[in-house]
Image (cartoon, rainbow, N blue to C red):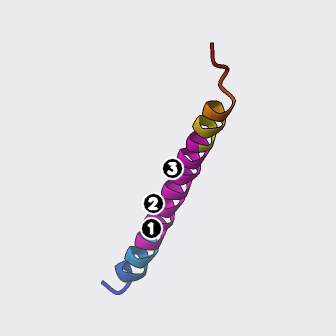
Amino acid sequence: MPLSQPCRKTSLRKRCFVVAKQQKTRFYIFGRCIAMLLCWHDHAISD
């Protein structure tokens, strides 16, 4: 049993790292989309 405990901590830490990286990526993409929409709105040519 003592051998499985460090593996569990490592896998939990790894899983948390992966989730944090995914969230960071989502926020980056979301921010870029918002910036693109704002710039497109500012520079839109009115007919």
- Tag 1: amino acid: Cys
Instruction: Please tell me which residue lies in front, 33 or 9.
Output: 33
Q: Residue, x 53% and y 46% (percent of image)?
A: 30
Q: Which of pointers 3 and 1 lies earlier in the amino acid sequence? A: 1
Say which of marks 3 and 2 sits in front. 3
Say which of marks 3 and 1 sits in front. 3
How far across and how far down the image is residue 37, in percent? Answer: 58, 36
Going by the image, does 7 lie left or right of 45? left
How far across and how far down the image is residue 23, in percent? Answer: 48, 57
Residue that mark 1 sits on: 16
Residue that mark 3 sits on: 26
Q: Which of pointers 3 and 2 lies earlier in the amino acid sequence? A: 2
Can residue 33 be found in the magenta stretch?
Answer: yes
Tally of numbered discs: 3
- Tag 2: amino acid: Val
How far across and how far down the image is residue 38, in percent? Answer: 60, 39
Q: Residue, x 65% and y 25% (percent of image)?
A: 44
The CA span between labels 3 and 1 is: 15 Å
Question: How many other residues sit within 10 Å of disc 1, few (<14), some (14-19) or many (≥20)?
Answer: few
Secondary structure type for disc 1 = helix
Figure quadrant of residue 29: top right
Figure quadrant of residue 43: top right
Residue that mark 2 sits on: 19
Which residue is outermost to the front? 47
